[in-house]
Amino acid sequence: MIRVGIAGYGYWGPNLARAVAETGTASVEMIADMSADARARAALRHPAARLTDDIHAMIADPHVDAVMIATPVSTHFDLAMAAMKAGKHVLVEKPMADSPARAAMLVDEAARRRRVLMVDHTFVYTGAVQTIAELIASDELGDIYYYDSTRVNLGLFQRDVNVIWDLAVHDFAIMDHLMASTPVAISAGAAGFVNGSPENMAHLAVYYDDGAMAHLNVNWLAPVKIRQTLIGGSRKMIIYDDMQTSEKVKIYNRGAAPSDDPYAQMISYRIGEMRAPAIPAKEALLTEVQEFVRCIETGARPITDGECGLRVVELLAAASRSCAMRGHPVDIAPLKVAS
């Protein structure tokens, strides 16, 4: 039984603790939070767990095998590094660090100490994204042309990160999992319209080495919540709508290609059937936590390991740099060398 310590019991920590308790292969050993109210809530839901207001004391506790970090982004690096130096395995909330250099340091430390470092990119573990990954791997979609995502809602406004680091980070992780090609440049523009808060809306374009392109629209100031992604391939296309209770993924046998008939129009269109595959109903967070425990027990590499987290942070840093230059494209490779 893997004994887990939860660092932070605010918004996401309770979900992590619940998932740990439901695995059957791990237990919530300790919960650390500076808030007395948060500890009181934790005591009601996890009466067997030990509670503390000192995260570093929990990290140092010899009865804790692994630490899950659900604290503000600015604290991720210090807490994850301290946990690994204490010999713990680490699952850290997204993004794993606030800079590529710090993310790379965490990856190196995990490799040196042979600890599991996993990033909480929960969407990667959804049945929908896993189904899309299988479709791409089987070549049913053909060559991937584009990834187009709209991820907007009204709130939650964050204090320490802007909308790119809060919402676009999900798509960057999904793209890292789905796209076989490598991102080479990014262009991003962002704006903020609520005084005292970071940028709350942004548009981003990611360019890949094989010519594919991704476009992201993220916004905290939209009147409705939309979570919709279009993926276009040379053979088939996909609409992934995470707000749907059923038929989250729809596959369209549609497309366009140059016409073989010199007397017809230059482009021929294919309008085929649509099908909606069955999507596994298992909760993504439970799948993720079970994967974390499995990797600790077997030494396997997680799907969203530290290197995945590093690639995502590199994209976030490049997007931030592009925003500072009002959308001027920023190459990814030089940032990797610099980090």
Image (cartoon, rainbow, N blue to C red):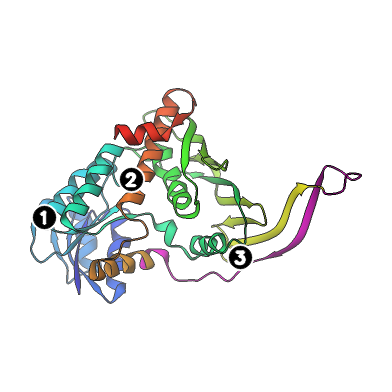
266 part of magenta stretch: yes
Q: Is residue 295 visible?
A: yes
Which of pointers 3 and 1 lies earlier in the amino acid sequence? 1
Residue flagged by tag 1: what amino acid is it? Answer: Ala
145 to the left or right of 39: right
- Determine which quarter of the picture holds residue 14: bottom left
305 to the left or right of 163: left
Mark 1: few/some/many CA within 10 Å (<14, 14-19, 20+):
some
**Residue at 62% in and 62% down:** 140
Judging by the rendered image, the residue that carries numbered circle 3 is 247
Farthest residue to the bottom: give it.
Answer: 24
Judging by the rendered image, the residue that carries numbered circle 2 is 310
Expressed as whole percent of the image width and height from the top left, the position of residue 243 reads 55, 57
Residue flagged by tag 2: what amino acid is it? Answer: Leu
Q: Is residue 198 visible?
A: no
**Residue at 8% in and 56% down:** 60
Determine the secondary structure under disc 1: loop
Q: Are marks 2 and 1 in contact (CB under 8 Å)?
A: no
Determine the secondary structure under disc 3: loop
Position of 32 relative to 277 (above/below)? above
153 to the left or right of 61: right
Judging by the rendered image, the residue that carries numbered circle 1 is 86
Farthest residue to the top: give it.
Answer: 325
Expressed as whole percent of the image width and height from the top left, the position of residue 167 reads 44, 44
192 to the left or right of 111: right
Position of 102 relative to 277 (above/below)? above
**Magenta part of the chain:** 260-286
